[in-house]
Image (cartoon, rainbow, N blue to C red):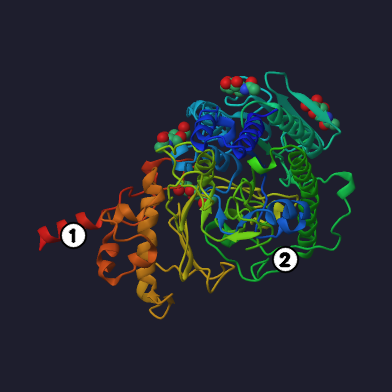
């Protein structure tokens, strides 16, 4: 039995005694001196899917998840990832840091993958390790990182888990022939079994371990659905890997006949959009669209197994005495696009489809059937878990706890910005991915950019600077599908364009300056970036910064730019790094005057 319930039983016993006249101060002393870890610290079940979109409505096809987690919990409608690619995003999530601070920016070495995570020292310094030292038993099953393989899984083993059963490359995305590796055991191949069925058994097994333990538990379940399937036999044949449509469990194969990708304005548009390589994509023909609709349905079908997995976990918790002491967090590592802006299936872009993911949280004190629209990000999740578990926040967290009834009385800053960053390759997935590319390759180079997504009172913007120094500015209030790039290098070119009552040059200079701060921010400066520009605290958001008295200050600021395109984080190639603060600017201006 868990301590929590033991103490619960003891306290109700004492309360009964109290009813017969036991002095309440004595009662308080007895209760206060009880061992309190388990009683005060909640459990966590963290479910992280792979490549699950928010914008293409995938979650709407998961009725069990909606009823267990959305109706009985809070849905965060403005939740974003900071890098739209599995491994960098997961390392950011498990460390609470932007990818420019982890420098795990890719899926494989030298810039990313499990070996880079280990080289950077994070195997001794990430969420499960911290939670274990705070008194948690920790369990993990499913995909942890890319390039965590059947060859390197033991050199070294992943730290921080009391029990683990990881999916390993190159079989991670083999839906019907996955390889899992448990604790210190050798890898095991699950040929012929569906990966989601396998992970469900493993997840329920670890949940049992967690429920039977004496300490609070943190269980992560990381299925690969709805990621593309990767045919591993192709690896031996030395042909380029093709990422094909995901595979559903047999019982879900024929669901959703006739369902199609939402035909929004930006779906396979007549005119190209975006910048850089995206602007060169070809319009997709009928056969390609049919395949992409099929691909979309396969994602929804593959997610049905995950929906049932969520249901099994919640039902098991319901049958225990721990449901009311357990936070269930559901999210994905990055979003996904299919057909928007003519893009074949994939992620890696800064568009809404790629950077928005579902976030659902249910647990003690979390409002039920609520939608929270505060801007939140993946780097906020480790701080959030710390906060809920009453662990003091780390100074190196680049994020801050998200709005939830807090375990402590502290009030955490909110933020209106998301720092989005990406280095290196993009991948055009699906059998017809390469066809969209004029040079017919499925790999795209120079997909390196920095962006800021900002949502505040009266504004809803996305601003990006690419490594070839192209820029984007979308006003999502008037252009929700990001089809109309308002950026112009010569601000006087469109004097008539206004964004919530301000000129383009006013808005662009502010966004560029905040991006200059964010692209190399650390800790507190990632959370409150305007403080770097205005150290006296007089400016806390874009609205304040737009005060015309700062026009000259923002116009004179160094501009975000790149010297060249790199595959990883090479600051020397990334132009100016430091912003001048308003107080220093004022001083030098006074000296000059
Ligand atoms: C990030 O990692 C790459 C690859 O190891 C390295 O070349 C680069 O200098 C690192 N960047 C920083 C800022 O340390
Ligand atoms: C889990 O691991 C931690 C750290 O090694 C250890 O202190 C704790 O006792 C373990 N829990 C169980 C149930 O073995
Ligand atoms: C399944 O994977 C194993 C390696 O884990 C491999 O030996 C086997 O050939 C694969 N089976 C199929 C049908 O590809
Ligand atoms: C990619 O960027 C490099 C360095 O900036 C440049 O030399 C090269 O021409 C670019 N390639 C493409 C395909 O854009």
Among the 4 quarters of the image, the one containing residue 45: top right
Q: Residue at x 33, y 65 (%)?
A: 545
Structural crowding at the residue carrying mark 1, measured as other residues with C-alpha within 10 Å and reported as few (<14), some (14–19) or many (≥20): few
Q: Is residue 7 above or below residue 516?
A: above
Q: Is residue 152 visible?
A: no
Among the 4 quarters of the image, the one containing residue 373: bottom right
Q: Residue at x 55, y 71 (%)?
A: 479
- Residue 281 position, x and y percent, is 62, 60
Instruction: Give whichever of discs 1 and 2 has the lower sequence position.
Output: 2
**What SS does tag 1 mark?**
helix
Q: Is residue 460 visible?
A: yes
Q: Residue furthest front?
A: 21
- Residue 97 position, x and y percent, is 47, 41
Out of 504 and 16, give the one closest to the viewer: 16
Nearer the observer, disc 1 or disc 2?
A: 1
The quadrant of the picture showing ligand 1 is top left
Q: Residue at x 69, y 49 (%)?
A: 429
Which label number is shown at residue 262?
A: 2
Q: Specify the quadrant that holds the N terminus.
A: top right
Q: Is residue 329 above or below residue 436?
A: above
Out of 584 and 42, give the one closest to the viewer: 42
Instruction: Tell me: 63 left or right of 82.
Output: right
In this figure, which residue is indicated by the disc labeled 1? 586
- Residue 162 position, x and y percent, is 63, 24
Q: Specify the quadrant that holds the C terminus.
A: bottom left
Q: How many marks?
A: 2
**What SS does tag 2 mark?**
loop
- Residue 268 position, x and y percent, is 68, 66
Q: Residue furthest bottom?
A: 496
């Amino acid at each position: 039995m868990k301590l929590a319930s033991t103490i619960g039983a003891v306290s109700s016993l004492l309360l009964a005694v109290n009813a017969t006249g036991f002095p309440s101060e004595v009662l308080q002393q007895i209760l206060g001196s009880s061992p309190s870890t388990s009683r005060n610290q909640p459990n966590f079940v963290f479910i992280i899917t792979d490549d699950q979109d928010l914008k293409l409505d995938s979650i709407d096809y998961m009725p069990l998840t909606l009823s267990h987690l959305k109706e009985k919990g809070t849905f965060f409608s403005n939740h974003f990832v900071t890098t739209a690619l599995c491994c960098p995003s997961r390392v950011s999530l498990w460390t609470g840091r932007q990818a420019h601070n982890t420098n795990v920016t890719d899926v494989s070495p030298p810039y990313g993958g499990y070996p880079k995570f280990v080289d950077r020292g994070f195997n001794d310094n990430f969420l499960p390790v911290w939670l274990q030292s705070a008194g948690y038993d920790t369990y993990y099953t499913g995909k942890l990182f890319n390039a965590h393989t059947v060859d390197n899984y033991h050199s070294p083993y992943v730290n921080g888990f009391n029990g683990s059963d990881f999916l390993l490359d190159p079989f991670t995305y083999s839906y019907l022939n996955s390889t899992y590796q448990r604790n210190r055991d050798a890898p095991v191949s699950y040929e012929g079994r569906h990966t989601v069925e396998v992970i469900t058994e493993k997840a329920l097994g670890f949940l049992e371990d967690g429920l039977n333990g004496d300490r609070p538990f943190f269980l992560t379940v990381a299925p690969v659905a709805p990621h593309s399937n990767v045919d591993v036999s192709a690896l031996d044949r030395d042909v380029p890997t093709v990422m094909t449509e995901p595979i559903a469990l047999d019982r879900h194969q024929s669901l959703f006949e006739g369902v199609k990708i939402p035909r929004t304005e930006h779906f396979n548009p007549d005119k190209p959009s975006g910048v850089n390589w995206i602007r060169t994509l070809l319009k997709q023909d009928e056969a390609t669209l049919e395949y992409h609709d099929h691909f979309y349905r396969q994602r929804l079908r593959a997610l049905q197994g995950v929906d049932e997995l969520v249901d099994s976990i919640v039902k098991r918790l319901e049958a225990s005495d721990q449901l009311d002491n357990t936070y269930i967090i559901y999210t994905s590592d990055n979003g996904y696009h299919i057909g928007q802006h003519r893009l074949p299936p994939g992620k890696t872009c800064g568009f809404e489809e790629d950077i928005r993911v579902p976030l659902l949280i249910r647990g003690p004190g979390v409002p039920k059937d609520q939608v929270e629209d505060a801007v939140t990000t993946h780097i906020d999740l480790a701080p959030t878990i710390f906060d809920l578990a009453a662990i003091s926040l780390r100074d190196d967290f680049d994020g801050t706890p998200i709005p939830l009834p807090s375990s402590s009385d502290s009030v955490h800053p909110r933020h209106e910005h998301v720092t989005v960053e990406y280095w290196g390759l993009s991948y055009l997935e699906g059998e017809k991915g390469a066809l969209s590319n004029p040079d017919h390759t499925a790999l795209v180079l120079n997909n390196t950019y920095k962006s800021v997504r900002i949502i505040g009172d009266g504004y809803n913007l996305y601003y990006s600077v690419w490594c070839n120094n192209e820029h984007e500015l979308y006003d999502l209030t008037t252009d929700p599908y990001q089809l109309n790039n308002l950026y112009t290098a010569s601000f006087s070119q469109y004097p008539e364009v206004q964004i919530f009552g301000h000129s383009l040059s006013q808005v662009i200079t502010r966004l560029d300056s905040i991006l200059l701060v964010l692209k190399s921010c650390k800790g507190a400066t990632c959370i409150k970036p305007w403080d770097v520009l205005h150290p006296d605290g007089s400016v806390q958001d874009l609205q304040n910064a737009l005060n015309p008295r700062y026009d000259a200050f923002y116009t004179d600021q160094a501009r975000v730019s790149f010297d060249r395109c790199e595959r990883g984080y090479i600051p020397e190639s990334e132009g100016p790094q430091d912003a001048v603060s308003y107080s220093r600017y004022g001083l030098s201006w006074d000296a000059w005057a």
